[in-house]
Image: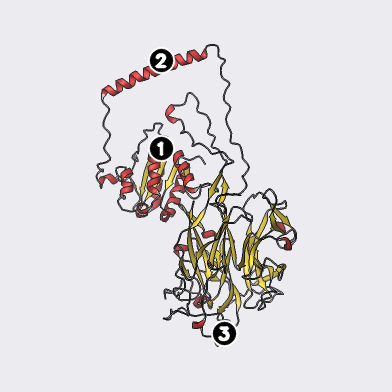
Amino acid sequence: MAHDVFISYASGDKHVADAVCATLESHGIRCWIAPRDVLPGIHYGEAIIDAIHECRIMVLVFSSKANLSGHIPKEIERAVSQGATVMPLRIEDVAPAKSLDYFIGSVHWLDALTPPLEAHLVRLAANVQTLLSRTGSSGEIHSSPASSSSFSQHNPVPAHIAPRAARPKWEYAVIGCLAIVVLILAVLTYRSKSIGVAPAAPVAAILPTPVPAAPVVVSPDKPKKLLAPVSASVSAAPLASSSAPSAAAPKPAPAARPPDVPHEVALHFVPDSTVKLEQLIGDVDKQTHKPTISQTYTRFGVEGTSLGSSFDHQGHVYFLFGATVGKLPRFVHTVATTDAIDPESGVRIDFLNAGGSNYLAVEPTGTTMAPMDAPVGGISLNGQMYVAVSTNFTPHRDTDRSVMTKFISPTTFQTVRTISQLPEGRFIRISMHAQPGPIAGLPAGGPFVFTWGTGKYRESDTYLSITPVGQFETGKGTRYFAGLDSANGPTWSDNESDATPIVKDGTLGDVSVTWCKDLGLWLMTYDRRTMPSNGIAFSYSRTPWGPWSEPQIVFNALHDHGFGEFIHNPRRKNDDGLAGPVMRPRNEADAADISGAAYAPYVVERWTKVQGPELDIYYVMSTQNPYVVVLMKSRLQIE
């Protein structure tokens, strides 16, 4: 993307940076901002370096958060070394840290300390337009010509930044002589080349040539790190004419890598980064003893529940919960929604209800829903909501069946087809996602809905099927991933029995797969019982079928401050105060004797975000005792 302005900011100031970008672009100024403009498959740091090289102005959103940032000084240093103008927009009344003061301590600032912010952004746009209209480039950091305030008025210029002295006259004489010599040599060279040589043919404009996407491959020395194709797009600016001023000539673009050279992209879990953000169910958070945001018991009669797979439908996030403990005299399965955009600011959920204070039960037509049955996944297609449920539970879990239903407002879940059936079925617990764009290796008949599934609960691998969107309700045309051919391309079968595992483990139960558009990656979270590294696992892949990365444990209840903190530990010497509610009749067992657990990690796709060199994922997780659902966050380093 051609751009004039690079926007530098700390992740905590993203809302201001987005406002800066929107204002500048509304004034016709081309901007580059992460993560929006980082192409899938490109190393994050490399994309930033290339973007800085191509910009003329860097707008820095300066605050106390920017002072603490490790990457902002590097970005400014790179911009200064490339001769770009740095224009700081100060949104907090703080002095720059030493790492920033070296570069911007004596630069004029545009203060945006007083509301409304929009007025300052309009002035910023005017300043940027003024600088872009200048034809000269001094290669130094410029002042904003119309700054409302100057930081240097409050802080003296540091000693290491000295004002530039005027040139002595003898320097101009030397420069003039050198210019004459260069001119004479140029004339002589031109005359010598023009004798007996035909004039050169005009140079044709070079246009970007599309390059097919390289297949996903696996590095032989690092077998499970994914290699993604380098972006093949080429910036093809028109050649400058001989009459154009030399000062206006564009900077040379960075050398492009050959399109067949793979670029490695890896996600690494940041140790100890997983945190519980809040408890979504109940009136009082069992850990903090503070009121929950959603107050689900007071508002809806919901005291406890589990699961919570999510999907977007008509601008809302829908959560599908399992057996629910509440004011109704029986266990039913429920649905809730939220409009929350920023999970860090708190999430308020609202349960669908069937009139009065009763919560709506997921009870598909012609299908029984026992307490251990559950809604397992949902999807929105062409304005219609579809919900898959697991039914036919027996103690040995060898008769489970999954069925697809469609929701007919306000209260009906109509059964439309069977998805899979044990003992041979591989799609009892599922996660669904519509195809986000062209994907090499898919058969004709798309676009498709991808369905990732597991068979017998917590005794399964993960499998993949595809169903044409136009035939989703009937399931006609469903095909199953049946392994790779000799060229490492996917093969597909009409028979579920031919399905080949895409993730082999043998202990999987609940699985969640989402799409990260900013990185061009599929993200998978799942609970597993593989010892000794059991817990909530995370993997990622460039394609729906893999290869999937080696699993990384992002949460273990024992090692990551779960047991005894917000998950009940009955073996603890002192009562942790976390027991109850539980999903059992109260006369069957004392809640204090029932151990809690961590399972069902369902990522909320709309909240996934790239923050600088890190990926943040937000997911709901069930804790069994207390029988509630909590919102979790984990961070992964992008490399």
Q: Amino acid at mark 1?
A: Gln
In the rendered image, the vertical position of residue 444 relative to residue 297, given as above or below: above
Q: Is residue 503 left or right of residue 342?
A: right
- Using the image as rendered, state which of residue 145 and residue 628 is in the foreground: 628
Left or right of residue 410, residue 79 in this image: left
Residue 183 percent across, percent down from the top left: 40, 17
Callouts 1 and 3 close, C-beta under 8 Å:
no
Lower position in the chain sequence, tag 2 or tag 1:
1
Identity of the residue drawn at 48% across and 15% down: 190
Mark 2 surroundings within 10 Å by alpha-carbon count, few (fewer than 14), some (14 through 19), many (20 or more): few
Which residue is tagged 2?
184
SS at circle 1:
loop
Q: Which residue is mark 3?
A: 585
Q: Residue at x 50, y 83 (%)?
A: 593
Question: Helix, strand, or loop for circle 2?
Answer: helix
- Residue beneath the point at 60% across and 79% down: 331
Element type where label 3 sits in the image: loop
Q: Earlier in the sequence, mark 1 or mark 3?
A: 1
> x and y percent of residue 339 in the render?
52, 64
One can see residue 385 in this view: no
How far apart are the alpha carbons under marks 2 and 1? 31 Å
Q: Return the mark for residue 82.
A: 1
- The answer to whether residue 249 is seen in the rendering is yes
